[in-house]
Amino acid sequence: MSTSATPVLLRPRWLIGHVLALVLVVLFVNLGAWQLRRLDARTANNELISSRSAAGPVGLATAWAEFIRSGEFPEYTVVTVTGRFAAEGEVLLRGRSLDGQPGFNLVTPLIIDAPDPSLGGVAVLVERGWVPYDHDTVPAADAPPPAGTVEVIGRLRPPSSAPGGLAPRDPEEGVLVQTYYVDTQRLQRQLPYELVPAYVTATSIVPPQTGDLPRPLPADDLSAGPHLGYAIQWFAFAVVGVVGYAILLRKVRRDAAARAS
């Protein structure tokens, strides 16, 4: 019975089926492993944020000096910087949402008081809050920065730019009012002062901003995210595929044996 059934599973259409089933199982396993790698990366990032938050704020120049010494950008380090906001240089970060409502994040240059020459600029961009979509011009209506000298406390972030592939891109020429990225090199072209090649996501501004806008940015999400659940799903698909295909092959063998008898 087994001998007569074997040729059925070695026919061309079944060989194609075996290969397809193997490819799908390998794909599902790799997708599960990819989600576990993303979970590891997120966990490490959360630990970095927590540790640098616990360390307390340092001056922007101090953090920058450590960057120059070590070569590792001090991302998420809590920094303090004092200066005056230049609302005329403001831009809007596209594609941001708050509590499910779409809008923009406001990015405003801060002219630094007594800037350190090692910073590489006399102004730093500050991501200072969120506004809804109807505030689509700059300076943003009803969301002015505090006047005079202010102290900004926030997380230091590296510049961002368009990745490869089909990611959205800003125009290469012209003045940007709305942008997808905090690209200091691109924004430098439209500003009359040198920018520090980094930006600060504000957690506190003293004196505080007045009015309802911009709304404060949410705290960093330090949860594990959905990656473990997704990994379990992909591994489950692989197991179901293997078990289901084995059951199918067993049925085919039985049917072939029955026909032969």
Image: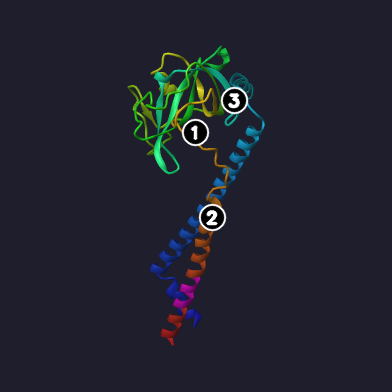
Q: Amino acid at mark 1?
A: Pro
Q: Residue furthest right?
A: 55
Question: What's the CA distance linking mark 3 and mark 2?
Answer: 35 Å
Where is mark 2, residue-wise? 229
Of 100 and 68, nearer the camera is 100
Tell me what residue is drawn at x 45 percent, y 65 percent. 18
Local packing at callout 3 (Cα closer than 10 Å; few below 14, some 14-19, many 20+) is many
Q: Amino acid at mark 3?
A: Val
User: Which range is magenta?
Assistant: 245-252
Where is mark 1, residue-wise? 216
Of 67 and 143, nearer the camera is 143
| Residue 120, x across and y down, in percent | 53, 16
Mark in front: 3 vs 2: 3
Tell me what residue is drawn at x 42 percent, y 24 percent. 144
Determine whether label 3 and label 2 are within 8 Å by CB: no
Q: Secondary structure at mark 1?
A: loop
Q: Residue furthest bottom?
A: 261
| Residue 151, x across and y down, in percent | 56, 21
Tell me what residue is drawn at x 39 percent, y 30 percent. 179
